[in-house]
Image (cartoon, helix red, strand yellow):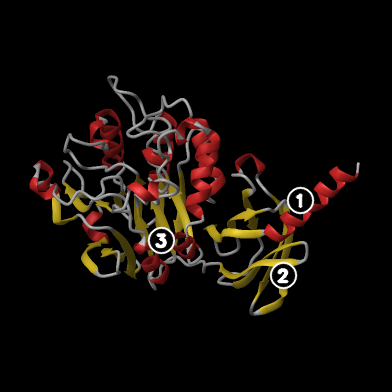
Amino acid sequence: MRIPLLLILSLTSILSVAQSVVSGPFQGHTTSHSTKVWFLGKGLDTVQYKAYNLMDSADIHTGSISADYDYCHKNSCPFKFELGNLKELGTYNLQIIADGKVLSDQEIQTIRNYDVDDFSFLIGSCAFIGTGKDKLYKLWNSTRIFNTLAAENNGDFMLWMGDNVYLMGKDYKSLNKSIKRYAKVRQHKKLNRFLKTKFHYAIWDDHDYGPNNCDGTFPQKENSKKIFDAFWQNPNAPHKNGIYFSMKYADIELFMLDDRYNRSDNKSEKELLGKHQMDWLKAGLTSSTASFKIIVCGNQMLNEFEGHESFMQYKKEKDELFNHIRTNQISGVLFFSGDRHHSEILRKQETGIYPFYDFTCSALTSWRYPLRKLFKEGENDLRIKELLLQHNYAVVSVSGIENNRAITVTYKNKFGKVLQSHTLRQQEISY
């Protein structure tokens, strides 16, 4: 019995030394009185957390949380918890504690509950980060942009618009390999530094869901959803059939779509969103009082070019959504999208309605197509301004007085240099 006991004592000692927070903590969905927190812990079982208000010593929040063991890679496991009853616009010091030792110590914040004010946020998509052998044969992969994002003074939060992780080769066929990919990517130093600086909201596209251009028939989609939910801290989804959700921030409302889980294969009357998601979206748009109602999708929403995926290829749903906006005279609708490994602004004039705009922002770090301008898509009658082919992100700024608001999308390269900008006045997309 002595040998097993010695082994147990040795393992306990090793685990004690190895205990650490290897990614995060970072904030997900945050309100004026609550915030969701995520981190990846190594060698940890159950930890304690303590958050105390830097301006009010009596405002202290404590608790304990156990690892989500179903989604561990070796001894690195995700942890998720929510802090409630916080003070509006409060700054808290958050500590993660194990066996009396403080493993992480950083500031977190809540937001101000306001209707109309000037604010900004960030958007981006297609963030390939090489791990293992990928680093050797994808030498083009540059992650410099995450340093720029971490230093970006603008932006209360970040919208990740799909392909936030690239499941490679056998990853998406195996739950364990997919978890390994997520865990390795999250430990990337530059990405981790950025994650700690803002609140984060995410949807997926094909590469963090399954194989390229996959649809709702993908047999591992439930595993993909479980892993996605384990590694992000979004608002609660309204239905189990997908990862779509909505959120309000000041006088905007974001409708974050799922373009994979319910997607039809290539059959007649095919659907991108599915009935439940479409009904939810239409109801949300109808009831929304937001100045700007932003529909966010991994795929482009207005591009008619046939060489890639687009909502325009789903005529039944496209007509259903656009007719609903037209019939109910819903003002302030615009679109954000990712996917394309280029950025552009598309403007489409529909009959009996104000012009629609789709601001595509891609790619953060994924491979680029520097010669795209030379081919058919280099000329697009819907495009306004320039086709951007370098790595980029965008700062979205909302400003102005009530009923006279403006939204400005400013694209920046990986060094933070402004590439182009476009402003929409509230009256331009209103009835």
Distance of mark 2 from mark 3, alpha carbons?
Answer: 31 Å
> Is residue 125 found left or right of 200 in the rendered image?
left
Task: Name the amino acid, label 1.
Answer: Leu
Task: Name the amino acid, label 2.
Answer: Ile
Q: Position of residue 419 (x, y in %)?
A: 21, 65
Secondary structure at numbered mark 1 = helix
**Of the image marks 3 and 1, the number of the one nearer the N terminus:** 1
Q: Position of residue 133 (x, y in %)?
A: 41, 45
Task: Name the amino acid, label 3.
Answer: Asp
Q: Identify the residue at horizontal 49%, vertical 44% (top origin).
A: 181
Residue receiving disc 3: 251
> Is residue 353 found left or right of 280 in the rendered image?
left
Residue receiving disc 1: 11
Local packing at callout 3 (Cα closer than 10 Å; few below 14, some 14-19, many 20+) is some
Find residue 361 and report its image quarter: bottom left
Residue receiving disc 2: 60
Find residue 170 and report its image quarter: top left
Q: Report the front residue among 15 and 295.
A: 15
Q: Position of residue 257 (x, y in %)?
A: 40, 42
